[in-house]
Image (cartoon, helix red, strand yellow):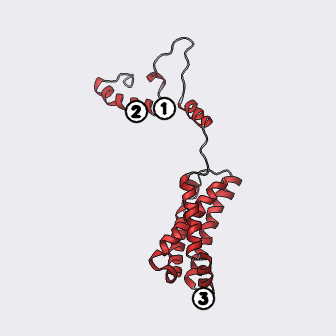
Amino acid sequence: MAEDKITTQDRDLLEPLLRLRRQFGHATHESQKPPLALGEETATAVDFMSAEKKEKPLPRLNIHSAFWIVASIAITYYVEFFKAVKEVIQTESWWFTLGGWLLLVSLSVAFYCIIYLEWYRGIEDYDTAYPALVPLTTASFIAAAICFNVALWSMWSFFTPLVLFTQFMGVVMLISLLG
């Protein structure tokens, strides 16, 4: 019974929070909802969200994606990216080899999370089920990026991080077009 009695001071503190919850469409407690007239229906946040999704799907190709893809193609052409990578591979650079292995580790863990855990086993929140996977993937990818920068530094000097980042963003945007 003591819980039913709310003092005016408590009500003054709770009122802004309740308004904020209602504004963002969160469910409120039954006792906090205003009474409905006979035949009156309420629209929920889910109804509004589903109506918005039905109205206009987001385009896969937008200006942002197109910019990165075109920039990646231009960089590939003007800096002769594949020729430079071929030269580094022919010199048997251990930085490039180490970067390749670290990238392989990163991609393997990512595919394990996406294909096996999410699609096959149905674990959508693999971050909580396997908390070490995301930091491992991130750390191996960052280490691979550093190794590739060191291996290709002799080709483009201080432009190397810019070239590699542009290539990375171009690949990411190209993959995002696929699905």
Q: Which disc is residue 86 wearing? A: none
Q: Residues within 10 Å of mark 2 (few under 14, many from 20)?
A: few
The residue to which callout 3 is attached is 91
**Image side of residue 87 versus residue 35, left or right:** right
Q: In the shown orientation, is residue 32 left or right of residue 135? A: left
Disc number lying in front (3 or 1): 3
User: What percent of the width, then of the height, locates residue 63?
Assistant: 55, 53
Q: Which residue is mark 2?
A: 20
Judge whether residue 139 can be spotted in this image.
no
Amino acid type at circle 3 is: Thr
Mark 1 Cα-neighbour bin, 10 Å: few <14, some 14–19, many ≥20: some
Which one is in front, 3 or 144? 144
Q: Looking at the image, is 128 positioned above or below residue 133?
A: above
Judge by depth and name the residue closer to the eye, 128 or 71.
Answer: 71
- Report the amino acid beneath label 1: Gly
**Mark 2 or mark 3, which is nearer the start of the sequence?**
2
Real-space Cα separation, disc 3 to disc 1, in angstroms: 60 Å
Residue 172 visible to the viewer:
yes
**Which quadrant of the rendered structure holds the N terminus?**
top left
Image coordinates of residue 109 in percent, x first then y, are 62, 65
SS at badge 1: loop
Q: CA distance from mark 1 to mark 2?
A: 9 Å
Q: Quadrant of residue 168?
A: bottom right
Q: Label 1 belongs to which residue? A: 25
Count of labels in the image? 3
Percent position (x, y) of residue 31?
45, 22
Residue nearest the observer in this picture, 78 or 118? 78
Q: Residue at x 53, y 71 (%)?
A: 164
Q: Identity of the amino acid at label 2?
A: Leu
